Image: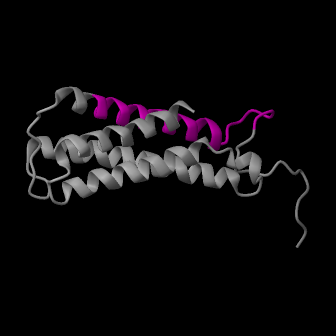
Amino acid sequence: MLAALSLLAVGAVHLQQYNELYSAIPTIGTLFVLNFVAATVLGVGLLVPFERLWRRGGAWIEATLALGGIGVATAAYVFLLIAQRRPLFGFMEPGYNPDAILTSQVSEIATVALLGAYLVVRHVPIGFRGRRSATRSTSTQEVKA
């Protein structure tokens, strides 16, 4: 839940900055809107209990949404770092709003850390008998060919 909220924060910061400063900048403005849309769709998707609703494929959907969220947050973080040091698509970040930049970076780092932890805890098999990976079957019967 925290991971989904941090991803939604990534999108919210980009929408706010688009409305305040970046709507008139070609390519960069469009990327801010795309970031908002992607973060919102993925963040809301992460709040849906797919595994409870669809036992067979729910875990895969949740893992895919988490990986997508990591991708969106990582791309935003990397693009900001590049734009602060050299032009990106003809634009260089002037640093007019250091609070928004810091909020963006914190939410992106938190998203990657929280979604990464979720994927490890939920989808990486570990050696304890009582615990299973969400993507592995609980059946003890083998399929006969």
Residue 120: x percent and y percent? 57, 38
Q: Residue at x 25, y 44 (%)?
A: 19
Total number of numbered labels?
A: 0
Q: Residue at x 44, y 34 (%)?
A: 6
Q: Is residue 31 magenta?
A: no
Give the side of residue 23 with respect to residue 142, left or right.
left
Among the 4 quarters of the image, the one containing residue 125: top right
Q: Secondary structure of the magenta portion, mostly?
A: helix
Q: Out of 52 and 37, give the one closest to the viewer.
A: 37
What colour scheme governs how the chains and residues are painted in the rendered image of this protein? one colour
Residue range highlighted in magenta:
103-131
Q: Residue at x 77, y 52 (%)?
A: 55
Give the side of residue 25 with respect to residue 57, left or right.
left
Residue 43: x percent and y percent? 50, 44
Question: Can you say which quadrant of the picture contains the N terminus?
Answer: top right
Residue 60: x percent and y percent? 64, 54
Q: Is residue 129 magenta?
A: yes
Question: Can you say which quadrant of the picture contains the C terminus?
Answer: bottom right
Q: Out of 4 and 136, give the one closest to the viewer.
A: 4
- Whether 105 is drawn above or below 69: the answer is above
- Whether 85 is drawn above or below 64: the answer is above
Residue 8: x percent and y percent? 44, 39
Q: Residue at x 29, y 39 (%)?
A: 16
For this orientation, the residue located farthest to the top is 99
For this orientation, the residue located farthest to the bottom is 145
